[in-house]
Image (cartoon, rainbow, N blue to C red):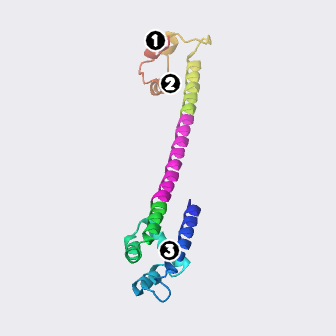
C-alpha cells in the first residue's frame, strides 16, 4: 500500500512539474509574479512537489495550495480535482480496506483460536469426568451405582460441581441415567 502511495504521488508530482513548474505563467516573458511565487513555494522541484502532494494524502490544508493556482489558471482545477479524487479519496479508501481486511482476518484467527481452546477444554472435561467416574467405580463394573456416587469425595464433588453446575451428585446421576 505504501509503495502504491509512493508511485501515485510520484506520477502526480511528475505531472505537476510539467503542468505547474513549466507553466507559461511561471516561466517565459508572460510570467506572472504571483504564480511564480506560488511555484517556488510549493512546486520548485520534484522532491518538493512530492512533499507538497503529501498534504493531499492527509487532506491537510489543501485549499491553501490549490485555490491560488486555480484562481490564476482555471485549467489547473482539472489536475487538482483528479489529484484530490485519486489520492484523497480512492487511495485512502484502499488503505482503509486493507486495514479492515486485516482486522477481519485477525478476528477469524481469534475465533478459530477460541474454538480450539474450547475443544481442548472439552477434552479435559471428558478426561476429568472419566478419571472421577473410574475412581468412584468401586466394584470395577464400568458402571456407577447410586451407592458408589454417594461416596464421592469432597474434591471430586467440587470438580463435578464446577463442570456441571449441579451441586448434588444425585442430580448428576439422575441427569445421566
* Residue extending furthest toward the front: 30
Q: Residue at x 53, y 33 (%)?
A: 118
Q: Which residue was labeled with disc 1? A: 174
The reply to whether the C-beta atoms of the residues labelled 2 and 3 are less than 8 Å apart is no
* Mark seen at residue 51: 3
How many angstroms separate mark 2 from mark 3 (CA)? Answer: 71 Å
- Element type at mark 3: helix
- Which residue position holds label 2? 156
User: Secondary structure under badge 1?
Assistant: helix
Q: What span is colored magenta in the figure? A: 89-117
Predominant SS of the magenta segment: helix
Q: Quadrant of residue 33?
A: bottom left
Q: Are marks 1 and 3 in contact (CB under 8 Å)?
A: no
Q: Depth check: 165 or 90 in front?
A: 90
Tell me if mark 1 has few (under 14), some (14-19) or many (20+) residues whose alpha carbon lies within 10 angstroms of its own.
few
Looking at this view, is 143 or 56 the one in front? 56
Whole-percent x, y for residue 78 in the image = 45, 67
Q: Residue at x 50, y 74 (%)?
A: 51
Marks 1/3: CA–CA distance: 76 Å
Give the mark nearest the N terminus, 1 or 3. Answer: 3
Q: Is residue 61 visible?
A: no
In the image, 141 versus 10, the foreground residue is 10
Amino acid at each position: 500500500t505504501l509503495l502504491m502511495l509512493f508511485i501515485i504521488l510520484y506520477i502526480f508530482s511528475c505531472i505537476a512539474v510539467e503542468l505547474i513548474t513549466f507553466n507559461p505563467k511561471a516561466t517565459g516573458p508572460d510570467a506572472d509574479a504571483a504564480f511564480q511565487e506560488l511555484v517556488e513555494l510549493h512546486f520548485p522541484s520534484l522532491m518538493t512537489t512530492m512533499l507538497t502532494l503529501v498534504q493531499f494524502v492527509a487532506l491537510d490544508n489543501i485549499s491553501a495550495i490549490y485555490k491560488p493556482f486555480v484562481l490564476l489558471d482555471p485549467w489547473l482545477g482539472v489536475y487538482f480535482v483528479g489529484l484530490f479524487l485519486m489520492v484523497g479519496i480512492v487511495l485512502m479508501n484502499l488503505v482503509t480496506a486493507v486495514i479492515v481486511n486485516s482486522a477481519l482476518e485477525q478476528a477469524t484467527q481469534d475465533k478459530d483460536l477460541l474454538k480450539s481452546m474450547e475443544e481442548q477444554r472439552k477434552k479435559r472435561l471428558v478426561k476429568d469426568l472419566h478419571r472421577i467416574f473410574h475412581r468412584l467405580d468401586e466394584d470395577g463394573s464400568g458402571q456407577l451405582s447410586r451407592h458408589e456416587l454417594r461416596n464421592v469425595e469432597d474434591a471430586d464433588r467440587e470438580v463435578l460441581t464446577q463442570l456441571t453446575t449441579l451441586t448434588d451428585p444425585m442430580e448428576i446421576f439422575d441427569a445421566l441415567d
